[in-house]
């Protein structure tokens, strides 16, 4: 197959609109409900509870806002340690700092690319007084939620589930976004369904939902004037954004099916290559396949070095690396991305504790960089990448992406 640059860019994951979104946005406009109250907000909260299976949903300006209010509801105080997923987007972790807590990063496991339950258990041995755990489901694949939940229960810790990437995914038949005491989903522009922005706090606790709703509207008290007795935030979702989300919800299952087809097409197309897809156990969970990712076999990696801002590699016959493949994508007008850089490797968090299943992971990270011991998150980050996963990508375009990847190993 001759490989030519795409005339129209092939995106990682862009919004897919259907028409009803505009109808509900127009309804907000014509009825003049343009702010943070209105029928669209009420409806998306109802639809979310119906789909996910939670009792209460609070519509907010972003998934990050939901995580912040979850951390606040969990009672995190200045100086409190909070166990957090390590390989994730910074939005999972930053809300802990908003409340002046101290994130402690828990290493990743190869089975799901999510928090390692064994490392979490080890973290409780080292920091037994920790009472909050923030768990993310990476790229739409649930972590080992039963094991993590049991560990949290054993140690009397509150679990917050960051399901921003996994709306519609299930674990043992149960929707993600229901495993924590407080949970968050996102409607950011690249998510499985979108409002262009927006998010939700999900819980079965009525008092918590009411507190979150109050905090999200500047903590206004029930008084005839603007009365404030505690700090509040401007976090409530707009009725206009909610109109977009409302129009997207009927297409959630359709989007998941399209994303799954992309994943399976990659998996079939990579046969014979020294790579594998981001894993999941089909007997336990059904991801939403938000992003298809791949990881290169260790013995098929060419030499690659990354600083905080740059990367370089040495091309080798029969081998490749994420940097080479991503550069090839860009040259052919396609978008890919590196795997989330683990939080314990980020400049802002390099002094924070990092726990592996063996214990303190800082020495192991340094050894990994030098070519020694294992650090699972650092290893997946070094060898993995996110593939174009846009559900508007044609089969022919995806075949071209596969051929581009194959050419990197020639």
Image: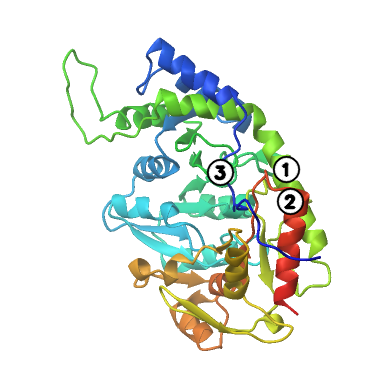
The kind of secondary structure element at disc 1 is: helix
How far separated are the C-alphas under marks 1 and 2?
6 Å
Q: Position of residue 24 (x, y in %)?
A: 51, 19
- Is residue 29 visible from the viewing direction of this image? yes
Mark 3: give few (<14), some (14-19) or many (20+) Cα within 10 Å: many
The kind of secondary structure element at disc 2 is: helix
Q: Position of residue 305 (x, y in %)?
A: 51, 82
Which residue corresponds to mark 1?
258
Q: Is residue 48 above or below residue 174?
A: above
Q: Earlier in the sequence, mark 3 or mark 2?
A: 3
Q: Residue at x 38, y 60 (%)?
A: 103
Residues marked 1 and 2 touching at CB (< 8 Å): yes
Q: Is residue 313 above or below residue 115?
A: below
Which residue corresponds to mark 3?
191
Q: Residue at x 58, y 80 (%)?
A: 374
- Residue 395 shown left or right of residue 214 in the figure: right
Q: Earlier in the sequence, mark 1 or mark 3?
A: 3
The kind of secondary structure element at disc 3 is: loop
Q: Position of residue 314 (x, y in %)?
A: 59, 86
Q: Nearer the viewer, residue 378 or 259?
A: 259
How far separated are the C-alphas under marks 1 and 3?
13 Å
Q: Position of residue 141 (x, y in %)?
A: 64, 52
Give the numbered dot on residue 262. 2
């Amino acid at each position: 197959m001759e490989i030519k640059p795409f005339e129209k860019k092939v995106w990682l994951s862009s919004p897919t609109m259907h028409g009803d979104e505009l109808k509900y946005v127009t309804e907000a406009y014509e009825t003049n409900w343009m702010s943070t109250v209105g029928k669209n907000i009420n409806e998306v909260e109802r639809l979310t509870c119906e789909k996910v299976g939670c009792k209460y949903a609070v519509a907010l300006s972003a998934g990050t806002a939901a995580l912040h209010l979850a951390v606040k509801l969990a009672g995190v105080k200045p100086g409190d340690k909070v166990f957090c997923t390590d390989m994730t987007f910074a939005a999972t972790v930053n809300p802990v700092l908003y409340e002046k807590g101290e994130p402690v990063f828990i290493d990743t496991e190869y089975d799901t690319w999510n928090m390692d339950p064994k490392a979490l258990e080890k973290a409780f041995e080292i920091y037994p007084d920790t009472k909050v755990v923030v768990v993310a489901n990476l790229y739409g694949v649930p972590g080992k939620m039963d094991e993590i939940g049991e560990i949290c229960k054993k140690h009397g810790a509150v679990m917050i589930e960051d399901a921003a990437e996994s709306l519609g995914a299930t674990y043992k038949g149960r929707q993600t976004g229901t495993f924590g005491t407080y949970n968050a989903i996102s409607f950011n522009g690249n998510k499985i369904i979108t409002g262009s922005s927006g998010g939700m706090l999900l819980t079965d606790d009525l008092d918590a939902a009411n507190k979150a709703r109050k905090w999200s509207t500047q903590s206004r008290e029930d008084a005839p004037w603007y009365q404030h007795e505690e700090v509040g935030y401007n976090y409530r979702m707009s009725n206009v954004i909610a109109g977009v989300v409302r129009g997207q919800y009927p297409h959630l299952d359709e989007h998941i099916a399209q994303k799954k087809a992309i994943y399976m097409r990659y998996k079939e197309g990579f046969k014979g290559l020294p790579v594998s897809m981001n894993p999941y156990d089909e007997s336990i969970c059904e991801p939403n396949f938000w992003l298809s990712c791949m990881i290169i076999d260790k013995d098929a990696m060419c030499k690659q070095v990354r600083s905080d801002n740059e990367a370089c590699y040495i091309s080798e016959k029969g081998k490749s690396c994420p940097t080479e493949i991503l550069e090839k994508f860009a040259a052919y007008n396609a978008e890919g991305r590196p795997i989330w850089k683990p939080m314990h490797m980020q400049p802002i968090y390099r002094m924070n504790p990092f726990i592996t299943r063996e214990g303190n992971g800082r020495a192991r990270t340094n050894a990994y960089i030098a070519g020694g011991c294992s650090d699972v998150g650092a290893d997946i980050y070094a060898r993995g990448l996110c593939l174009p996963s846009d559900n508007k990508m044609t089969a022919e375009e995806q075949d071209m992406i596969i051929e581009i990847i194959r050419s990197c190993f020639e």
